[in-house]
Image (cartoon, rainbow, N blue to C red):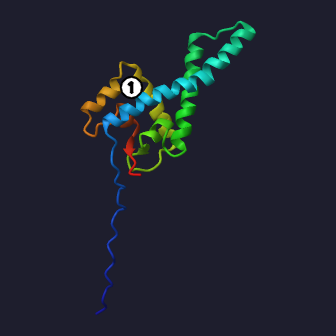
Amino acid sequence: MQQRKARPEVSPPARQTVELAGLRRRLASLVYEGLLLLGVLALTFMVPLLIIGIGTHYTPGGGLLWAYIFAVLGGYFLWYWRRGGQTLAMQTWKLRLVDVEGKPVPLGQACVRYTLAWPSICFFGVGLVWAVLDRDRQFLHDRLAGTRIVLLNT
């Protein structure tokens, strides 16, 4: 009789365990982010529009201005999220944006999160209030986009 060699059992790869950031820390980071965005918008929005307005006496319409703000802020967030998962405020508060497996967020998923964050915040903060009811205390746009904000240990 031939003896069969026992095959070693292959276990599925272990999920990376990360500590989800607390709600207070994420809200504090959000407030700080808002202050930083005032500077970003002053540099990329107000200054160019003042120069255009003074030089040409032209002011773009409201819809075009909102589209410009959406694009400028999208560029800011997507650039930082793809370059290490942290905006300037997130670096200060030791937070990082990851997917549900704890890996860096791909560009498409970051775009979905950014787009969903607008109604989540602008409709009376309903997406932020959602975190009080959510089992993991995640914002609604994070839950829908499949992302998480985690606390860094370092």
Residue under the image location 37 percent in, 55 percent down: 16
Report how many numbered discs are placed on residues in the image: 1
Q: Residue furthest top?
A: 57
45 above or below 7? above
Image quadrant assignment for residue 11 = bottom left
153 above or below 121? below
Image quadrant assignment for residue 79 = top right
Q: Residue furthest bottom?
A: 1
67 above or below 144? above
Residue 36 placement, left or right of 13: right
Please give the residue where the numbered disc 1 appears in the rendered image: 120
SS at mark 1? helix
Residue 23's x, y, as percent? 31, 35
Residue 67's x, y, as percent? 57, 20
Residue in front for this viewpoint, 76 or 29? 29
Residue 116 placement, left or right of 10: right
Residue under the image location 54 percent in, 39 percent down: 80
Residue under the image location 35 percent in, 22 percent down: 125
Classify the position of the N terminus by image quarter.
bottom left
Image quadrant assignment for residue 53 = top right
Residue 69's x, y, as percent? 56, 22
Label 1: few (<14), some (14–19) or many (≥20) C-alpha neighbours in 10 Å = many
Residue in front for this viewpoint, 3 or 113? 113
Amino acid carrying mark 1 in the image: Ser
Residue 12's x, y, as percent? 35, 62
